Amino acid sequence: MDICVIDWRAFTPIIASLIATGIASSTALYISRKWSKQKGAEIIADESKQVIKDTLEMVKIINYIGSGSSKKDDLKDLDVFKKLFESVVINTAFIEDSIIDNSLKISFSLFSKKSIPINKMISAQKIEVGDTNLSPLISEFNEAAISLVNVLNPYSIYRKPCKFKKK
């Protein structure tokens, strides 16, 4: 009968190094995941800020033209409006594709729907300064734009945590 004797002094450094390695790697993994979520929230906040700025600029442009306080020369602002609209749609679609938020989906859909008639009129060059027929369209557009801004605002100032979609 053989007796097995283990030299614990030889195994102690191996066990200690395995424990230290496990702790270090799990800490690194935890920090990496935490940083990834934080960076994602930062990107969403930056995109949200840009959408808010562009949307409010669109509201300003269309209200100036609709109120008649703009000059005929300022109709070039309609080209700016179209470019801002494209930017808002692209950035909001990115945000919507990245996070889970049903209120954003609803607001973005409403904003897109209410923007279509104004964009069609701009493309057909049927908008004139002070046109009273624009009032209902502008009012609906303003409501949809402010709704979108109100949904995105908490993300832009880090007040609402981002729930990212799993890809």
Image: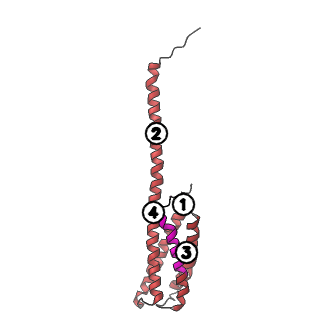
Q: Are marks 3 and 2 in contact (CB under 8 Å)?
A: no
Q: Position of residue 116 (x, y in %)?
A: 56, 79
Question: Is residue 120 visible to us here?
Answer: no
Which image quarter: residue 113?
bottom right
Label 3: how many Cα within 10 Å (few below 14, some 14–19, many 20+)? many
Three-letter code, disc 1: Ile
Q: Earlier in the sequence, mark 4 or mark 3?
A: 4
| Residue range highlighted in magenta | 140-166
CA–CA distance between discs 4 and 1? 12 Å
According to the image, label 3 marks what residue?
A: 111
Residue 58 within the segment the image draws in magenta: no
What residue sits 46% from the left and 71% below the top?
52
Three-letter code, disc 2: Ser
Tell me the colour scheme of the image.
secondary structure
Closer to viewer: mark 4 or mark 2: 4
SS assignment at label 3: helix
Q: Earlier in the sequence, mark 1 or mark 3?
A: 1
According to the image, label 2 marks what residue?
A: 25
Q: Which mark is residue 45?
A: 4
